[in-house]
């Protein structure tokens, strides 16, 4: 089978959408760090629209900070790849042309730095996942003892995202160029302010003047990004190849829904994102709280419960009436902690979330969402729980979400099978779980003592400790399915 490429684009079946612009005329105004499936199914699609609308200065150079697999797949395809939009309707296929090339940072740090320092680049966007910011998830401050931060402060060539950004900004400043705008597209609270805090501190540790310049000059607008994009599986490739009649080594699969809310602060310019459906606003916080606490909070809760209950995908998990009820109640519990969005129909939003979770065609694995819980829990469950306690409200469902994570990180499932834990804190979590044993009254305080996740207040607060022990005890005694069903009956 021929490969998807500029040369084979013309021969695709008419049902497959494709770049309706001259890719050769596009220049690169954006560097994107962390060129994973999410970026390719979300921001790159919007940029593809802008290129088609004639804003040809905003092509994307992608960069992987670790492995070369995306580059290896996309290079023979001239950067082209397919977006397959899946729902109960027939799958829609669209070839995206926004990515001109992919750099692999560890293979050529200087190449990436040179690109970042190029004044033609005016936006550097990021999807490096929560852990890529090298920050303390509980406080949002730079984790100064992080091995990558230590490395980047002592060596000439960086390896972390903050390290690359600060070194590139240093070079731009030295050359008399304006800084690029840093556009974080990760699911962090106040992602713009967070990345700015991390970069400013990192720069200060290198050079006080540089730190001051970054603090004064660097724009880091906050964003809320939303689209469910499961990891691409082999079956997806087979489906895409059959639809295209040529081979695509790395398509992406997504739901129809997408949302992108962006704080409108781009001192050195931006594409007309609003013309492609992006919401440009003054304050992203109400959108971000809503999305992190309703969608992502529910996602994590149902991922842990669902995995433990033996459900492979999100759709399978929410087909369980008990788990679906937990999801609905979690959203209601989080609602009083949100910020008002005048005129916004929150009930319709919640209902739509439940519909999105039930999308039968997505095959989004509970195990994928369960990953990196130590980095996700703080904004998804801990912060809203803290807000509720401050309002004098109990945290029954959030406590169950936290307990389900605790049960999950013991590393063995309800049938005694081994769970493939993926988390920067895995070693610590395993040690704590082994020392405490499967005893809720011991495991709960031990895990609540992890300050990077729960801060200093949770372990000592009976309004947290007691409901979490109760929920965790139930998970140990009767399992996830029965625990969810019990809660549904209450
Ligand atoms: C998920 C998110 O894997 C996860 O942690 O909760 O990737 C989620 O699918 C996206 O944030 C949806 O916008």
Image: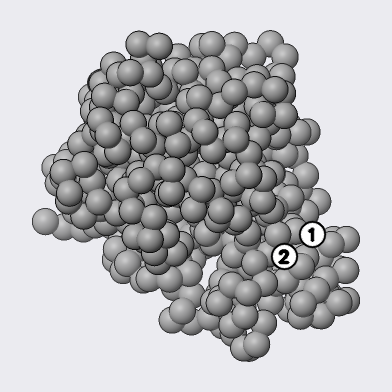
Looking at the picture, tell me which residue is in the foreground, 370 or 209.
370
Crowd band around label 1 with a 10 angstrom C-alpha radius: few (<14), some (14–19), many (20+): many
* Quarter of the image where the N terminus is located: bottom left
The residue that appears at 86% across and 68% down in the rendered structure is: 213
Q: Quadrant of residue 380?
A: top right
Q: Identify the mark nearer the N-term, 1 or 2.
A: 2
* Residue 490 image position (x, y, % from top left): 40, 11
Against 145, residue 252 (above or below) is above
The residue that appears at 48% across and 69% down in the rendered structure is: 65
* Residue 247 image position (x, y, % from top left): 19, 53
Horizontal arrangement in the rendering, residue 259 relative to residue 480 (left or right): right
* Residue 92 image position (x, y, % from top left): 29, 31
Q: Quadrant of residue 474?
A: top left
Horizontal arrangement in the rendering, residue 209 relative to residue 365 (left or right): right
The residue that appears at 30% across and 19% down in the rendered structure is: 485
Evaluate whether residue 306 shows in this view: no
Against 214, residue 14 (above or below) is above
Q: Secondary structure at mark 1?
A: loop
Q: Label 1: which residue?
A: 218
Residue 199's disc number = 2
Mark 1 vs 2: CB contact within 8 A? yes
Evaluate whether residue 341 shows in this view: yes
Against 169, residue 467 (above or below) is above
């Amino acid at each position: 089978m021929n490969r998807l490429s500029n040369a084979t684009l013309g021969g695709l079946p008419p049902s497959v959408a494709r770049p309706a612009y001259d890719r050769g005329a596009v220049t690169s105004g954006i560097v994107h760090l962390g060129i994973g499936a999410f970026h390719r199914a979300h921001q790159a699609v919007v940029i593809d629209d802008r290129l088609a609308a004639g804003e040809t200065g905003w092509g994307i150079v992608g960069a992987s900070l670790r492995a070369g697999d995306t580059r290896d797949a996309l290079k023979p395809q001239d950067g082209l790849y397919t977006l397959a939009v899946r729902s109960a309707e027939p799958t829609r296929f669209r070839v995206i042309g926004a990515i001109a090339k992919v750099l692999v940072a560890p293979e050529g740090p200087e190449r990436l730095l040179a690109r970042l320092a190029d004044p033609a680049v005016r936006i550097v966007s990021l999807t490096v996942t929560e852990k890529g910011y090298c920050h303390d998830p509980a406080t949002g401050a730079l984790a100064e003892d992080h091995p990558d931060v230590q490395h980047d402060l002592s060596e000439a060539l960086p390896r972390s995202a903050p390290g690359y950004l600060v070194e590139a900004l240093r070079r731009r400043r030295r050359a008399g160029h304006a800084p690029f705008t840093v556009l974080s597209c990760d699911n962090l609270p106040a992602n713009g302010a967070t990345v700015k805090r991390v970069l400013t501190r990192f720069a200060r540790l290198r050079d006080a003047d540089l730190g001051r310049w970054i603090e004064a000059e660097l724009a880091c607008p906050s964003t809320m990004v939303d689209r469910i994009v499961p990891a691409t599986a082999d079956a997806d490739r087979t489906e895409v190849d059959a639809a295209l009649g040529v081979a695509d080594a790395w398509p992406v699969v997504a739901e129809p829904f997408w949302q992108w809310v962006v704080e409108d602060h781009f001192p050195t310019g931006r594409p007309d994102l609003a013309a492609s459906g992006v919401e440009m606003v003054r304050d992203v916080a109400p959108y971000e709280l809503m999305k992190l606490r309703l969608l992502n909070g529910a996602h994590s809760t149902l991922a842990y419960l669902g995995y433990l209950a033996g459900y492979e995908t999100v759709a399978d998990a929410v087909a369980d009436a008990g788990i679906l009820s937990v999801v609905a109640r979690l959203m209601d519990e989080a609602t009083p902690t949100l910020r008002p969005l005048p005129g916004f129909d929150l009930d319709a939003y919640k209902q739509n979330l439940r519909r999105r979770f039930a999308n039968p065609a997505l095959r989004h694995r509970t195990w994928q969402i369960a990953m990196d819980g130590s980095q996700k829990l703080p904004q998804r469950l801990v912060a809203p729980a803290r807000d509720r306690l401050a309002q004098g409200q109990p945290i029954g469902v959030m406590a169950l979400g936290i307990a389900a994570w605790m049960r999950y990180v013991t590393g063995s499932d309800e049938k005694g099978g081994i769970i493939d834990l993926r988390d920067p804190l895995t070693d610590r979590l395993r040690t704590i779980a082994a020392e405490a044993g499967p005893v809720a009254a011991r495991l709960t305080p031990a895990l609540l003592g992890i300050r990077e996740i729960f801060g200093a207040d949770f372990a000592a607060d009976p309004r947290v400790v007691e409901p979490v022990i109760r929920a965790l005890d139930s998970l140990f005694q009767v399992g996830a399915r029965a625990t969810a069903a019990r809660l549904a009956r209450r």
